[in-house]
Image (cartoon, rainbow, N blue to C red):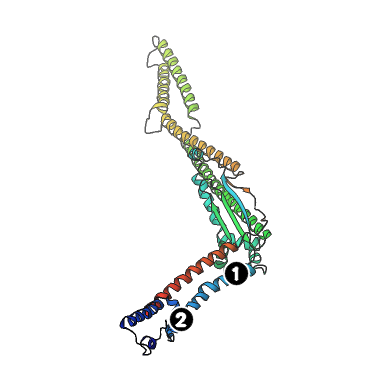
Amino acid sequence: MSNRPDEITGDRQPMSALDRNKQATTALAVVARKLRLTTSQRGKLYASVGLRPRGIDKLMKALFIAAFVIFFALPNIASGLYYGLLASDQYMSETRFTVRTSEPMQAADQFGDMSGIPSAKIVQDTQIVANYIISRTMLERLEREADFIGRYSSDQADWLARLPEGETIEERLEYWESMVDVGISPSSGIITVQVRAFSAEDARAIVQEVVAASEALINDLNDRIWNDATASARAQVERATASLSQARQAFETARNESGILAVEETSTSLSALLTQLMGEKIELEGRMNAVSDNVSRDAPQMRVLAREIEAKDQQIAQLRSQIASTSGGGTTLADTSTVFSQLTLEQTIAEQQLTASITALEQLQYLSQQQLMYLDPFLAPTLPDGAEYPRRAFWSMIIFVVSLLTFGIVAGILSIVRTRLG
């Protein structure tokens, strides 16, 4: 049945009202089916009814095509060209090592032995080494010892992956961080270092220099520890020597002021002299008693004996005063003995401190020949057999998925906009 209006309302054949209604219903159904077409077929709809598409539809179509090219086609073509033709092979060398401590003065870490978790000292030293590997100091050493710039800016690397010329130290450090991966095992403290380069030999050479620099760092930390400890021990020896010198000087001054070289010898001599004087006095008293019956007390002989006995009494009193008491404010032998004992004690303590300080210094000098910390590389830097990077299939798939999602989002937004405008 024709859909033209003149056929519906033509005058060639008379039609009943029922037939005309059926014919109009059929024509409207056809138009409704065309109106239900998707918006992407609106141009065909316009053509089917003899209308020209609007300018907004032409613009939306152009935007759809541009979005497809920009967000999907071009990224996938670029990734295909780069990963398929331009991307340079990158080789990864790996090493693994631990930082161990053999500090003899440090008590054994019983908790670490029981739990298997590294001690806090080892964890701290491990973190120091790991941070040193990605530091500016490490980069400067690699540039100086391993030709870092020459290896990573060579022509054998593609323009996108190699190190650009004229980069600042901060930019070179950022590039180095992108080419090295440092991981630490929390349970064992093992440090894993992975370095990528554009040849297998370069990758291993860089890793070897990283290990050498890390060992130099550990040795430097050892030297600093021992130097600080030895300097402290030497200072303690100097202080103990000064204290002993002061104690000896004080003792010498006390002996010079008292005129006594040794209290014990002086006390023994005074006791012997006192005993002798007392004996002589007793002898004189005996002689005086013997002649007193026959000679008058006023006789010259008796007066001489009396003066000798009086002289002996004075000498005995003076000796007793020197030994145990004071007479006239003088210093007693007991006081001198107390002073000498105190000074002798101070001198003995100073000598013991000096001896202990010298012993500690000698022990430190002996122990300084050992390493408190050392690097234990149980996996030597490897020479890679093949290139592991770049991961062409992985990144191509990532770019494909991301570009597809991006194009889908943009296309959805354009569809919403066209629907609102239409």
Amino acid type indicated by mark 2:
Lys
Mark-to-mark CA distance, 2 and 1: 36 Å
Query: For mark 2, what is the residue?
Result: 44
Q: Is residue 219 above or below residue 412?
A: above
Compare marks 2 and 1 and give the one earlier in the sequence. Answer: 2
Q: Secondary structure at mark 2?
A: helix
Q: Quadrant of residue 155?
A: bottom right
Q: Nearer the viewer, mark 2 or mark 1?
A: 2
Q: Residue furthest left?
A: 17
The location of residue 178, given as percent across then percent down, is: 56, 62
Classify 10 Å Cα crowding around label 1: few (below 14), some (14-19), many (20 and above).
Answer: some
Evaluate whether residue 162 shows in this view.
no
Left or right placement of residue 421 versus residue 359 in this view: left
Total numbered labels placed on residues in the image: 2
Q: Nearer the viewer, residue 414 or 33?
A: 33
Amino acid type indicated by mark 1:
Gly
Left or right placement of residue 2 versus residue 368 in this view: left
Image quadrant holding the N terminus, namely bottom left
Q: Nearer the viewer, residue 113 or 34?
A: 34
Image quadrant holding the C terminus, namely bottom left
Q: Secondary structure at mark 1?
A: helix
Evaluate whether residue 398 shows in this view.
yes
Q: Residue furthest bottom?
A: 11
Left or right placement of residue 303 versus residue 352 in this view: left
Q: Nearer the viewer, residue 265 or 93?
A: 93
The location of residue 116, given as percent across then percent down, is: 51, 41
Indicate which disc residue 324 carries.
none
The location of residue 331, given as percent across then percent down, is: 41, 33
Q: Is residue 178 above or below residue 256?
A: below
Indicate which disc residue 80 carries.
1
